[in-house]
Amino acid sequence: MKHLSLIFLSMVLLLISCKREEIRIACVGDSITEGAGTKNQSTSSYPVVLDQLLGKGYNVLNCGRSAATMLKKSDFSFWETNQLYNLFVFKPDIITIALGTNDSKDHNWDAANFENDYIALIDSLKTLLPQSTIFISNPPPAFNHSWGINDSTICFQILPIIQRISKQENVKIIDFYTPMKDQIQLFPDKIHPNEEGATLMAEIIKKSINN
């Protein structure tokens, strides 16, 4: 009888521990993800706001790195950052990828390599983190040519490539571009969203992952 009681207690504790397990979300990106444009990145970046919106039972990791690109051959590739290592260590249940803004710079842009490198990252994540659900993102609009970022490249080349990748790799798209394309007031420097913009991005992600 005592033995059965111990088994029952162990099962109850196991069920409790399973219920307490957090859903881990990693947000991959560049300075927009990192929180540039907000007054305090540690409290106002969209991954932090997303964590607050989702509440108890979720743990969101900011894997944004300023100036990062998807392209392996560029002025600063995400493939070379510590954030990529942190992503694998974190072992997230959900990964959102928001890269492309810095890829659009004239000296970086290469359509074929961008598509190939994006697919390579997704395939690497599927292999090394098979438990993860992956979302890819349409970058927000760029309202001027600051830092060489090119909204025309984002709109007419990057968005169609992301659409193709979504179908080929069977991953869903989080669309930041469409709902923010007429929201220039949310981008004080015309590239990075402010606190209100970061909150909107977090709300878009929340809606996407809950659908």
Image (cartoon, rainbow, N blue to C red):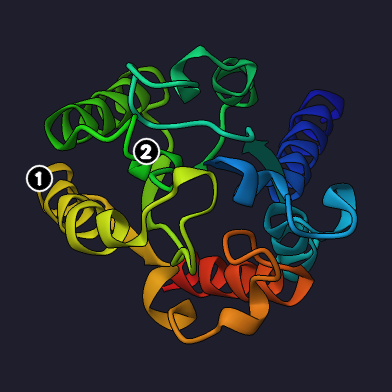
Residue 12 lies, in percent from the top left, at 77, 43
Residue 146 lies, in percent from the top left, at 54, 52
Q: Which residue is disc 2 drawn over?
A: 103
Dot in front, 1 or 2: 2
Q: Residue at x 18, y 54 (%)?
A: 157
Q: Which residue is disc 1 drawn over?
A: 168
Secondary structure found at label 1: helix
Horizontal side of 110 relative to 192 (left or right) equals left
**Res 53 quadrant in image:** bottom right
Residue 144 is tagged as none
**Res 71 quadrant in image:** top left
Mark 2 packing: few (<14 Cα in 10 Å), some, or many (20+)? Answer: many
Horizontal side of 102 relative to 90 (left or right) equals left
Residue 78 lies, in percent from the top left, at 48, 24
Q: Would you place residue 50 above or below residue 128 in this image? A: below
**Res 201 quadrant in image:** bottom right
Q: Residue at x 80, y 38 (%)?
A: 13
Is residue 1 or residue 130 the one in the foreground? Answer: 130
Horizontal side of 29 relative to 106 (left or right) equals right
**Quarter occupied by the N terminus:** top right
Q: Would you place residue 131 above or below residue 136 in this image? A: above
Secondary structure found at label 2: helix
